[in-house]
Amino acid sequence: MAVGSTLFAVMVWGSIGGVLAAFGYISWLLVSLRRKT
Amino acid sequence: MVSQTAALAATVATLAVFMMAGLWYARGRVGTAEDLLTARNSTGTAATTATLIASTMGAWILFSPAEAGAAFGGLTAVLGYAIGSAIPLFLFIPVGSRIRELMPTGHSLTEFVLVRFGPVMYLLVVVVSVFYMFIFLAAEMTAIAGSLELVAGVPAWQTATAVGLFVLVYTAYGGLVASIFTDTVQTLVILPLLAVGFGAAVLLLGGTDAIYTTAMSTDPTLLDPGFRPGLEFGLYVVFAILGANMLNQGIWQRVYAADGESTLQRSFGVAALTVVPMVLLAGLFGVAASGLGLVTPETQSVAFFLVVSEVLPETIAFAVVLLVVLLVMSSADTMLNAISSLVTVDLARLGAVEGEQSLRVIGRGLTVVVALGAILIGAQGYSVLQLFLTADLLAAAVFVPLIWGLYSKGLTERGALAGSLAGLVVGIAYFPMLRGLLLVVPGLGSLLPVPAFLPAFLGATGVSTLVTGLAVAVGNAGFEFDSLTTEIKSFDEPTAEEPKAAAGEVSD
């Protein structure tokens, strides 16, 4: 139960982190391109 | 519940802002039919990644994965859905590179099919492709209409009409250039909104421990990784999504819109990695809804919104409304432009339309027709998952010969057709929603197998692959891939040797 619960928490918060990481990556690309041009 | 007026006002305001943004960006950038339909070699990694995420992740992610989690096999089904959503994007990395190499001035998969195989296979692919994309569009309209009705009581026809018309205006005017630009901005709003909204929702539901404990006490199979129905769903949904995406002209347009090989590879890779957590999060709400005892057989298709409207405060529900509007806009504009692009390009190739001006008029006219059709169907309230599965089955039977034909010289049109039709027959025989078509054949009813989704999808793709393989083994077409370069030309350039440089510059 404890292992399952921990894995579930990792899945949920890891997914939220993954979505935010994608946002960060795209934003970073856009900002670096703006700086170059 | 969010008030009807507030929800409708927020929806219309969001639609208006993005419509204006699309019109503003496209102004002066859509000079030719190529800009309207292809935006060739014009987008960098950020814009390509963002537009892929926005285009493929429609409002359906708030319906189908949650429905799968609530009713089709819990966590395992959701995981299958998430991984299945990423696989086609990964597959587009080699396949997209290959098609750009074979036909650098191409526009669509159907163009390739016409030259590579011939008119009969081409017709089959056009029908299945347009059918799938129209279903996608109609499902998006159904999704937004249904969700606003649930969360705020807005009549379905009002939502479908508002969304359809606003998206239509900027897509008809700005084409792919406007679609990619608005997609980029929408992704930058969708991703944080999704993460923060879902994070807040998890905390308001008592945290992951509370959700886990409630689900386990209500129905332990919801979180059982070995639950057989969940594993089966997770498996067949992979084939369903794979086939459908391979016939999605919206993605093929973006293969050509990417400004180079490395952009294509990085963008499709990052988009694939991003859609996994997006689908997973949405699907887990279905598991939560089921665990909280909110789901009945009649309401399983709106499991996500049951949690939103019955458990979460109005502020989170309001954020969800905005999220749904953005998700719908970003995929509806893609599908609208993709369908009109596919048909316009094909009309041009078949010689039915001549001249740059006529192509643009036809492209825009078709966008209007398709949008009106989608609005009408969207207001009817059909099941989003069932609509998708039906279109997916047809695509699952057809896509293998197309991909095979990109690499094999030996596959003939007859072989490709035999593979597709054999897959279709097997798939339909098992498919619960379509097998009635075969019952009209006298004496066939007693021979049909027990209906089930898993053998339907595995059968459609597996038999199609097997028959295509046999056809390649015995075939001797000796197709010359070089002919693709010479026969498929840009609308702007008379020669295929010098692909036109980007004019649309949907830059990062």
Image (cartoon, rainbow, N blue to C red):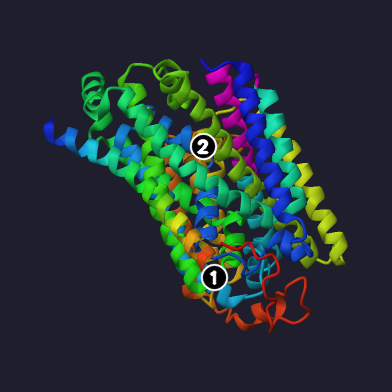
Image-based side of B506 in relation to B187, left or right = right
Q: Amino acid at mark 2?
A: Trp
**Which class describes the residues within 10 Å of circle 2: few (<14), some (14-19), or many (20+)?**
many
| Nearer mark to the viewer, of 1 and 2 | 2
Looking at the image, residue B183 lies above or below residue B198 = below
Q: Amino acid at mark 1?
A: Gly
Looking at the rendered structure, which numbered label has been put on residue B60?
A: 2
Front residue of this view, candidates B409 and B160? B160
**Which class describes the residues within 10 Å of circle 1: few (<14), some (14-19), or many (20+)?**
many
Q: Magenta-highlighted stretch: main secondary structure?
A: helix
Query: Which residue is the site of mark 1?
Result: B405
Residue B223 position by quadrant = top left
Residue B432: x, y in percent?
A: 49, 34
Residue B62: x, y in percent?
A: 47, 33
Q: For the magenta stretch, what is the residue range?
A: B134-155
Q: Taking the image as drawn, is residue B225 in sight? A: no
Which chain does the numbered disc 2 sit on? B
Residue B449 position by quadrant = top left
Give the residue furthest to the left: A2
Q: CA distance from mark 1 to mark 2?
A: 31 Å
Q: Is residue B150 magenta?
A: yes
Residue B88: x, y in percent?
A: 45, 56
